[in-house]
Image (tube, grey):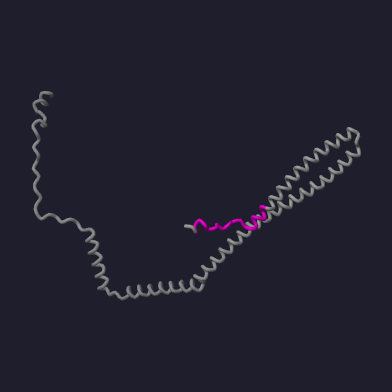
Amino acid sequence: MGNLFGRKKQSRVTEQDKAVLQLKQQRDKLKQYQKRVTQQLEREREIARQLLRDGKKERAKLLLRKKRYREQLLDKTENQITSLETMVQSIEFTQIEMKVVEGLQVGNECLKKMHQVMSIEEVERILEETQEAVEYQRQIDELLAGSFTQEDEDAILEELNAITEEQMELPEVPAEPLPKKKPEKVPSEARPKQVELVAAS
């Protein structure tokens, strides 16, 4: 019991899974950075507009230079995110391809084992033996059919007729004569009253 609960379960997480997870985490961090920089750019543009209204042109220009630099960083970040997503997709697709190859390999090994058990030579030998057995049986049938005399044929027919009669045997006719049937007496009430009939006519 102690071994059962103390046994470590083997992790199904592969190195590829870990790599994909890390790439996705890095991508998410870059997206958060991208969102933060975009918000900062919007604020800096508003500040530059306010500085121009206040007549502080040089400070507004400096701020716009800073903003331009951040925009370039934003473009680089977008490219990095695209690269990370491409890498994740490539790894995931490669994992699928590996599973397909593993399945093909298992199937190929199975077919090889089956072919070892049943080679072409073995199949040809079985078919040849089957053909020989069929031919041998045909020869026996021909010999048996040719070895019967007319007397044998008559005996076979006689036995066949006897079996047929047994199957269609009718019941025996009784030896004693059947009892004669006495006519039943009709009750007087059931007889038509001739007197009434005559009177009615």
User: What residue lies at 39% left-to-right and 75% top-to-bottom?
Assistant: 136
Q: Which residues are magenta?
A: 3-21
**Horizontal and vertical percent for residue 190?**
11, 32
User: What residue lies at 84% left-to-right and 36% top-to-bottom?
Assistant: 47
Q: Quadrant of residue 153?
A: bottom left
Vertical relation: 95 (above or below) 29: below
Viewer-nearest residue: 137 or 3 = 3
Vertical relation: 136 (above or below) 165: below
**Horizontal and vertical percent for residue 142?**
35, 74
Vertical relation: 114 (above or below) 41: below
**Horizontal and vertical percent for residue 73?**
80, 47
Residue 169 placement, left or right of 112: left
Q: Quadrant of the C terminus?
A: top left
Viewer-nearest residue: 160 or 64 = 64
Residue 94 placement, left or right of 129: right
**Horizontal and vertical percent for residue 95?**
64, 57
User: What residue lies at 9% left-to-right and 41% top-to-bottom?
Assistant: 183
